[in-house]
């Protein structure tokens, strides 16, 4: 049942944001303390520049995926280009020390004129768990999957 309910009715309005230069340890402490799975990252002027997800912090403890390499003939190997790029990205994140190095820079977001249906569709189609609500490059809220589920529970 599609909902034309404005996203502003389900979003968290009191959003905790982080600065790009925040250390990974400090970010992990804050997300853990607040029980959040993500936080928008804003620059000194308050403009959103990224989204830090709890999964972005996991890379420092995770096993890296080595590039997929095939031996074609003795002494001749072929490395899958996509796996090499993924390994390079993971290595950079694992060696990083600030949020700017690990945050998602190409994240999904909506304006405050979006509906619950818009956000739910975006979350489903792009497999995202958190969607910042942004007006004029400034964060005005954030929607988590749990916010949508709570909304559904109260309307059915």
Image (cartoon, rainbow, N blue to C red):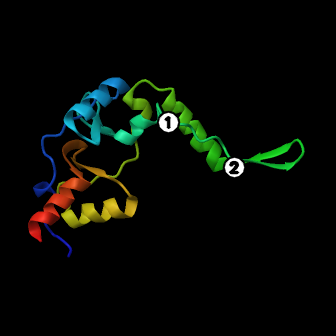
Q: Is residue 31 left or right of residue 98?
A: left
* Mark 1 secondary-structure assignment: loop
> Closest to the observer: 60 or 124?
60
Q: Is residue 77 left or right of residue 67?
A: right
The residue positioned 37% from the left and 27% from the top of the image is 24
Vertical relation: 15 (above or below) 6: above
The residue positioned 67% from the left and 48% from the top of the image is 81
Tell me, yes or no, if residue 83 can be seen here.
Answer: yes
Specify the label residue 25 is tagged with.
none
Going from N to C along the chain, the mark reached first, 2 or 1, is 1
Specify the label residue 62 is tagged with.
1
Q: Position of residue 112 (x, y in %)?
A: 17, 54
> Closest to the observer: 49 or 79?
79
The residue positioned 39% from the left and 41% from the top of the image is 55
Residue underneath mark 2: 80
Q: Position of residue 103 (x, y in %)?
A: 39, 37
Which image quarter is the N terminus in?
A: bottom left
Q: Position of residue 34 (x, y in %)?
A: 20, 35
The residue positioned 90% from the left and 45% from the top of the image is 74
* Mark 2 secondary-structure assignment: loop
């Amino acid at each position: 049942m599609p909902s034309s309910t404005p996203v502003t009715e389900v979003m968290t309005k009191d959003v905790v944001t982080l600065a790009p230069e925040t250390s990974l340890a400090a970010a992990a402490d804050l997300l853990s303390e607040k029980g959040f799975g993500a936080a928008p990252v804003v620059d000194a002027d308050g403009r959103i520049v990224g989204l830090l997800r709890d999964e972005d912090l996991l890379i420092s403890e995770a096993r890296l995926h080595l590039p997929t390499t095939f031996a074609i003939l003795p002494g001749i190997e072929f490395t899958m280009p996509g796996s090499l790029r993924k390994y390079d990205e993971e290595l950079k994140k694992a060696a990083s020390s600030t949020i700017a190095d690990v945050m998602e820079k190409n994240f999904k977001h909506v304006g405050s004129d979006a509906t619950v249906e818009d956000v739910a569709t975006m979350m489903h189609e792009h497999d995202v768990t958190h969607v910042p609500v942004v007006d004029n490059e400034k964060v005005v809220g954030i929607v988590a999957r749990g916010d949508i589920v709570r909304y559904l529970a109260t309307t059915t």
